[in-house]
Amino acid sequence: MTVMSYIQAITTALREEMIRDEKVFILGEDVGVKGGVFRATDGLYEEFGAERVLDTPLAESAIAGVGIGAAMYGMRPVAEMQFADFILPAVNQIISEAAKIRYRSNNDWNVPITIRAPYGGGVHGALYHSQSLESIFANQPGLKIVMPSTPYDAKGLLKAAIRDNDPVLFFEHKRAYRLLKADVPEEDYVLPIGKADIKREGTDITIITYGLCIHFALQAAEKLAEEGIDAHIVDLRTVYPLDKEAIIAAAKKTGKVLLITEDNKEGSIIGEVAAIIAENCLFDLDAPIMRLAGPDVPAMPYSPPMEKFFMVNPDKVEKAMRELAEF
Amino acid sequence: MTINRHDALGLSDADVLEIYRTMLLARKVDERMWLLNRSGKIPFVISCQGQEAAQVGASFALNRQKDYVAPYYRDLGVVLAFGMTAKDLMLSAFAKAEDPNSAGRQMPGHFGQKKNRIITGSSPVTTQIPHAVGVALAGKMEKQDFVSFVTLGEGSSNQGDFHEGLNFAGVHKLPVITMVENNKYAISVPFEKQIASENVSIRAKSYGMFGETIDGTDPLAVYAAIKQARERALNGEGPSLIEAITDRFTAHSSDDDDRTYREKEEVEEAKKKDSIITFANYLRELDVLTNEIEQEFNREIDSIVNEATDYAENAPYAAPEDALKHVYEEM
């Protein structure tokens, strides 16, 4: 075990996969000489050279599209979008192409690409460096969307994404990059894509969330434990396709469910989670499904008080959890 | 007297006859699809007619055992030259289970067949350019000696993926040949309302690559241009942008009526340069295409098209619930 930050776990996973399989290569803006604007590819250019850590022109549709072409040939590209907010010019390539290529060719072609993108707020990033854009892609069968919450999960899931034979969007919370540090095994391991993970066992209320909000919920749960409220916390880890079994089991376990996302509430991932629970657990519920999310405004403002107002934080989570427990 | 132009290109009489035969096959498959559409047997057709010379001339200049192609929806001539059969195409037209492109999932004209290195395509235009660039990048990384060849219409050259893809290819000097089949119309919108520059190939300069505009109704001119482009690509001289001037003899598709936006005379005039006729004349004047060979070609192709049609019409559809298959890899 080594103590690693979230971003070190990402870099380690990339490096180990590049050593393991020479078909793995990285492409994106500033990923080469600079090592990435967040330094996720730090040292890889020096170790693997310009061809396998490819600095591309500033053109997201080409980063995705060229990656898709190389993947169809049989390479394992890991494309980096500098910020999730800038993935939008590549949406046609991701949704019209990557997501549909296996299906439209009746399994003749496939696209083993991983597209990494830092997402999330609380970093003074304003509207265009703070967004959670996963819901745009979360009704596109053919895609998988992974959003790890810990360094351990980040390493194991990124390796799984790179080895996956279908396209995976891999969203990394940029505030988690240096905030989170934890023990990560030095040896090779992969975690299953499509499986949720219980981050805290509890009996009174169920919290289902993903990404940085997991930590807000864990912090709040420790406080509430002192008051005798025992929270069960489930990390979706893969937000598309959802682990329905785990969601249903977690909802039935306590009968009280709080769903949390940093995204805007409307049309977000947790809306679908709520629908799954409503369809399957109606008679097991002891309280209405509760949702905590960002407000329905276009994106996060720059000014610190407004940013704080927008963001989910441990206090907001604690308040919601207590309210649910007392219902 | 007609001068033999194909000798100098390294093409034998047998080669040029095969080019002609492939053009004729593309035309006749296409014509049959229109008949099937107008008689209510297939829902849709989108045509290669008028562009066969560019498609087949270019394909024969490529290595058809090695190179990758990312065709667009009119490229019947390209896919036939790369090993797809008339039967395959008819199975696609009838949306039957055995269609190798998609098992009847996609509309006709959405080609793809891995065994022949025909990269699967979609309907949003120009997305195939970055794919072809990616395949070329992979080939370069793997030290392979193939090129990728990608085609599109001139209207599609206005898309962002054209700029992003070609610039990427230019920066990394990748072995990609882009051929714009300029048939002068993007559905109804003519060239002058689509493109501000004098032609499409002039854009090559801004991508640091070779560009030229050629007569796309002459298969030998296209063959020569693509052959040179391939040599440059394999010599590490980077990508090329070739603009082949062609004509579209039909409406945009079976769902379009071109009488609303272009004069009948314009099409009649274009048909005077129909490559199926002009190339046949060239071959006849050189005594390469004899009456005997021509009759044999027609007989053979008619029977291929008939058999393909009958087979496809009688072939089964995929089971309805097969619609659920192949979303992700199935373990």
Image: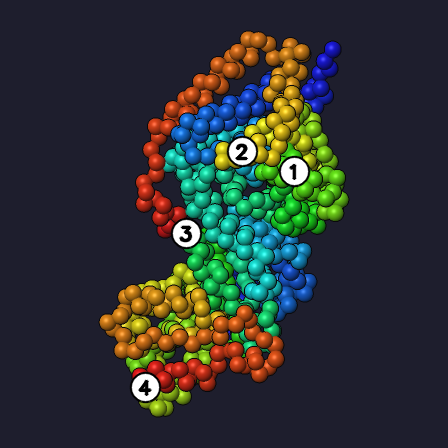
Which of the chains bears the disc numbered 4? Answer: A
Mark closer to the chain start, 1 or 2: 1
Which quadrant would residue A80 be assigned to in this image? bottom right
Residue labelled with disc 4: A326
Q: Label 1, secondary structure: give it.
A: strand
Residue labelled with disc 2: B257
User: Disc 1 or disc 2, which is closer to the eye?
Assistant: 2
On the question of residue B176 being in view, the answer is no
User: Disc 4 or disc 3, which is closer to the eye?
Assistant: 4
Q: Position of residue A225 (x, y in %)?
A: 36, 87
Q: Position of residue B266 (x, y in %)?
A: 65, 27
In the rendered structure, which amino acid carries the disc numbered 4? Glu
In the rendered structure, which amino acid carries the disc numbered 3? Tyr
Residue lying furthest bottom in this view?
Answer: A227
What residue is rendered at 34% in x and 36% in y? B317
Give the number of marks: 4
What residue is rendered at 48% in x and 59% in y? A137
